Image (cartoon, rainbow, N blue to C red):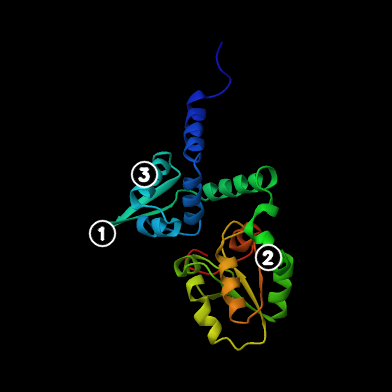
Amino acid sequence: MTSELDSHFFDKASDIAKSLGNGRRMQLLELLSHGEKSVERLAISLDVGITSVSAHLQILKNAGVVRARKDGVKVFYSIADKGVSQLLDHVKNITAKIGYPETETALHMVSEHSISLHQLINKLDAGNCVLVDVRPKDEFETFHIPGAQSVPVEEVSDWALNFNDNHEVIIYCRGIYCLLSIAAMQSLTAKGITCSIYPQGISEWRRAGFPVEGAFA
């Protein structure tokens, strides 16, 4: 009896699925969904050795999930297709609903400071807030919410020293499983500045179809 389905196609689909079957590789894809990065930069972001990161990237590349380019002695990686980022979002959403509810995230501890997408839009429309993107500078330059200031998390404390605006400060990063916003909030609180967090970050903003600014807007 002839199969009703193309076995070769599903074998390839299985290869892609297998390449995602590792938490570290999922983290790499999360970082790459915010723009091209070098192997060295990825290793620093995850606090993992370059050899380990390179091995994971090679698996993703062989599966066709990411692509690589050389620039001198450095190798840069990027997402091969926007569908990969969409798949990653779906997996994260399923994980949140089934295996890792939002109440288990670090952001739940600061939920009283969180605002929704609807609230953010209202505040931006009213023009009574200062929106701060605490992701690394290169991610901000790739794409960011219009009107946001770039203040990488390691620069937040110095930025706070010169902040004398009476408007509300709203910070955001990659999304609910990115911890940069919490670190930034802690730094601002230590300087006596109260702030709100948009926990779903740039990921939800883009999924909702709102415009972004930057090199890949």
Q: Based on the displayed image, in which of its 4 quarters is residue 119 positioned?
A: bottom right
Image disc number at residue 55? 3
Amino acid carrying mark 2 in the image: Val
Q: Residues within 10 Å of mark 2 (few under 14, many from 20)?
A: some
Alpha carbons under labels 1 and 3: distance apart: 20 Å
Alpha carbons under labels 2 and 3: distance apart: 36 Å
Residue marked by disc 1:
72
Q: Based on the displayed image, in which of its 4 quarters is residue 111 positioned?
A: bottom right
Residue at horizontal 42%, vertical 56%? 47
1 or 3: tag closer to the N-terminus? 3
Q: Residues within 10 Å of mark 3 (few under 14, many from 20)?
A: few
Q: Is residue 71 above or below residue 169?
A: above
Residue at horizontal 65%, vertical 47%? 100
Quadrant where the N terminus is found in the figure: top right
2 or 3: tag closer to the N-terminus? 3
Residue marked by disc 2:
110
Q: Is there any visible trace of residue 212 in the rendered image?
A: no
Front: mark 1 or 3: 3
Left/right placement of residue 71 relative to residue 78 reads left
